[in-house]
Image (tube, rainbow, N blue to C red):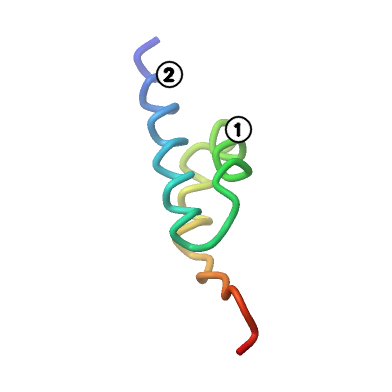
Amino acid sequence: MPWFAGWGTLALVNAGLAQGKNRSGLLWFALSLLLGPVATLALVVLPKVRQTLF
């Protein structure tokens, strides 16, 4: 059972990381609950989203 706390904490960290890269924190939180460390790897590899074109 202790791994539930770690998995949930990782999902919260991923949500913060996603928001820092201008991505949806809620979406990445949900993906992290399903995929765990794979979602973290994806967030680290993906580039930051630009807000505007210019």
Residue 24, placed above or below residue 35:
below
- Disc 1 residue crowd, few under 14, some 14–19, many 20+, Cα 10 Å: few
- Residue lying farthest top? 1
Q: Position of residue 44 (x, y in %)?
A: 44, 60
Q: Quadrant of residue 30?
A: top right
Question: As displayed, is residue 26 above or below residue 48?
Answer: above
Disc 2 residue type? Answer: Phe
Residue at the spot 43% in from the left edge and 52% down from the top edge: 17
Q: How many marks?
A: 2
**Residue 49 vs residue 5, the one in the foreground:** 49
Q: Position of residue 35 (x, y in %)?
A: 57, 38
Q: Is residue 42 left or right of residue 9?
A: right
Relative height, residue 3 to residue 29 (above, below) = above
SS of the residue under disc 2: helix
- Left or right: 35, with 17 as reference point: right
How crowded pointer 2 is (Cα within 10 Å; few <14, some 14-19, many 20+) is rated as few
Q: Find numbered disc 1 in the image and state the secondary structure of the residue it sits on.
A: helix
Specify the label residue 34 is tagged with: 1
Q: Residue at x 46, y 42 (%)?
A: 37
Looking at the image, tell me whether mark 2 or mark 1 is earlier in sequence order.
2
Determine the residue positioned at 48% across, 63% down: 21
Determine which residue is flagged by label 2.
Answer: 4
Q: Residue at x 49, y 54 (%)?
A: 19
Residue 9 appears at what percent x and percent y?
38, 31
Q: Nearer the viewer, residue 2 or 18?
A: 18
Q: What amino acid type should be assigned to the residue bearing mark 1?
A: Leu
